Image (tube, grey):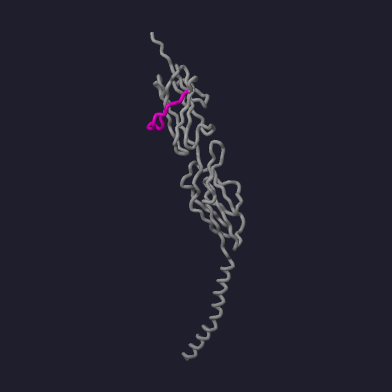
Amino acid sequence: MYLLSSLCIIIYGIDVIDPADVITFSATLFNTSTITNDSVTLNVELSNCTIPCSCHVQTNKTGNFEPVKFHSTTSKGYVTINNLQTYTMYSFDLNCSEVIYIKTYTIRTDVSRPSPPNQIQIILIKQRLRLTWAPPNLPNGPIDTYRITVDGKEKKPYLANTELFYDLNENYIFGVTHTMSVRACNTDSQKRALCSNAGDAESSFVENKTDLDTTVATIDSKSVRSMPFVLMYFIQSVIFTF
């Protein structure tokens, strides 16, 4: 009679184990330092295994087979998968010696700093300034908020990622220059705000109403001075006709 031995692999981080699986492959998302914006570290624990044991992990079923590094005196090990893309979903297949079942788990990498918003523009609408923009070309995440700065002062509350304009709440005073900027921000797994550079999405606005009034007044005065000559020419023409 032969005695079949079983090998159970647990990637620790989640305490829930499915007894129907020979391998339980799990990792905690967004609240562990093993997941960054360009790498994932998987912790593996073996039970009922005669050391040394061997395991490997493959990324997206097409990547290289990365060996799990086990500690010499324990059945615990880890493998780090590097050079991953930011905020991207990956699948990882874990396979170990003496185990015929492969467990697949999907993990999304963390967010990173987005590129600045595009098409920055300030326009005057009914005596109010409006700052408009387009989303970043490289969001590197879902874009949690847009943050507006007006003349060096950051405005709150922050705007949701669906809002692509900001209106000043006071009438514009002609001749005054205002500088406005917008930052796109993501929040990573450590609750840190990663924002684009405000200087890369900044614009200034000024309109001088005095110059416009002077121009209009000059045009009106010329029109008034020319009217007597036009009237005199008209009268002379009428007399000559008769």
Outermost residue on the left side: it is 62
Question: Does 7 sit left or right of 163 as displayed?
Answer: left
Q: Nearer the viewer, residue 169 or 114?
A: 114
Q: Is residue 103 above or below residue 183?
A: above
Residue 142, position in %: x, y? 50, 41
Residue 7, position in %: x, y? 44, 18
Q: In the rendered view of the protein, which quadrant contains the N terminus?
A: top left
Q: How many marks?
A: 0
Q: Nearer the viewer, residue 92 or 224?
A: 92
Question: Does 41 sit left or right of 156 as displayed?
Answer: left
Picture residue at 50% right of the left edge, 86% below the top: 233
Picture residue at 45% right of the left edge, 18% below the top: 51
Question: Does 113 sit left or right of 67 as displayed?
Answer: right
Residue 100, position in %: x, y? 39, 21
Residue 95, position in %: x, y? 41, 24
Q: Is residue 91 above or below residue 129?
A: above
Outermost residue on the top side: it is 1
Q: Which residues are magenta?
A: 57-70
Q: Is residue 30 above or below residue 7?
A: below
> Is 119 included in the stretch rendered in magenta?
no
Q: Nearer the viewer, residue 36 or 26?
A: 36
In the figure, residue 81 lies in which quadrant?
A: top left
> Is 63 included in the stretch rendered in magenta?
yes
Outermost residue on the front side: it is 72
